[in-house]
Image (cartoon, grey):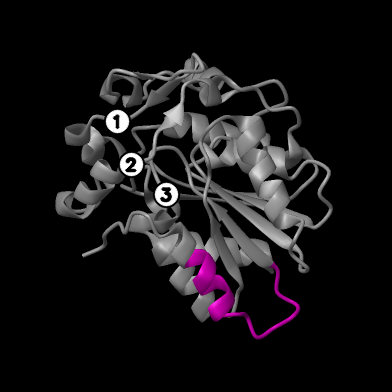
Amino acid sequence: MKTFFPGLALALAICSSAFAATSDTKPTIVLIHGAFADSSSWNGVTQILHKDGYDVIAAANPLRGLANDSRSVVELIRTLKHPVVLVGHSYGGPVITEAAKGNSNVKGLVFVSAVAPEKGESVHDIMARFPGSTLPASLEKPVELSDGNKDLYIQQDKFHDQIAADLPEAATRLAAIAQRPITAAALSDAATEATWKTLPSWFVFGDADKAIPPAALAFMAERAHSKQTVVVKGASHAVMISNPQVVADLIEKAAQ
């Protein structure tokens, strides 16, 4: 049974140094999770990449806003001595798109059920252009924050069907309870650069994604002239958890 292990961002970062790659020629893989998740959502993919000799960092995405979140990735990748492949899931797509701006050590982008925004475009813009997502109807009443922003959560009893319907329901129970909120503003923040225009990009997503319509994901892959697009039949929004080998294989192609 595949399952989530919430709250392991620090542990994964420690593991990335404990299981260092043996080859100096391989790039470092930096994995960026999306909304309502944490770095443990990459566990299955990380295990495969480590086995195949890659250094991996599953970074903690703050989920506070595009400028803030991408800055945290930039500060991380500037400390790395090897070339970097950035991998983003869902809202992690805009974050890696933004973080790659002006960073010459980033050599490729992999979008996993992720938004790849055009300059001036936001997650909200894409969702409005391609209706059909059931995510808005699954959200809890927003949590009002002291700075005027709002935190968004998915209703716990709808989390499984919305995010990971191709996994056993028991496997998502802890993830629903431990989900990390994203601010409403983050989903309306516009990208300042479409770095997929100048960097090679790869896309993988499920054709049963209920959070981001598959038609939107296919459109963004085609727009980015994806080097390879993998559509996993029956896979949910959490394709990297239900199909870690497929996702890891595409990341390794990007890394090569």
Identified by mark 1, the residue type is Ile
Which residue is rendered at x = 75% and y = 39% of the image? 195
Identified by mark 3, the residue type is Asp
Answer yes or no: do the residues labelled 2 and 1 have beta carbons within 8 Å? yes
Mark closer to the chain start, 3 or 1: 3
Task: Estimate how packed mark 3 is, as few (under 14), some (14 to 19) or many (20 or more) residues with alpha carbons within 10 Å.
Answer: many
Mark closer to the chain start, 2 or 3: 3
Q: Which residue is mark 1?
A: 154
Answer yes or no: do the residues labelled 2 and 3 have beta carbons within 8 Å? no
Image quarter in which the N terminus is found: bottom left
Q: Is residue 222 left or right of residue 212?
A: right
Q: Is residue 74 left or right of residue 51?
A: right
Label 2 residue SS:
loop
- The magenta segment is 12-27
Mark closer to the chain start, 2 or 1: 1
Q: Nearer the viewer, mark 2 or mark 1?
A: 2
The answer to whether residue 8 of the structure is visible from this angle is yes
Q: How many marks?
A: 3
As drawn, 97 above or below 40: above
* CA distance separating discs 2 and 1: 8 Å
Q: Which residue is mark 3?
A: 38
Q: Which residue is mark 2?
A: 179
On the image, which quarter does residue 126 sit in?
Answer: top right
The answer to whether residue 212 of the structure is visible from this angle is no
Q: Which mark is residue 228?
A: none
User: Which residue is outermost to the bottom?
Assistant: 22
Identified by mark 2, the residue type is Gln
Task: Estimate how packed mark 2 is, as few (under 14), some (14 to 19) or many (20 or more) residues with alpha carbons within 10 Å.
Answer: some
Which residue is rendered at x = 58% and y = 40% of the image? 93
Which residue is rendered at x = 73% and y = 25% of the image? 119
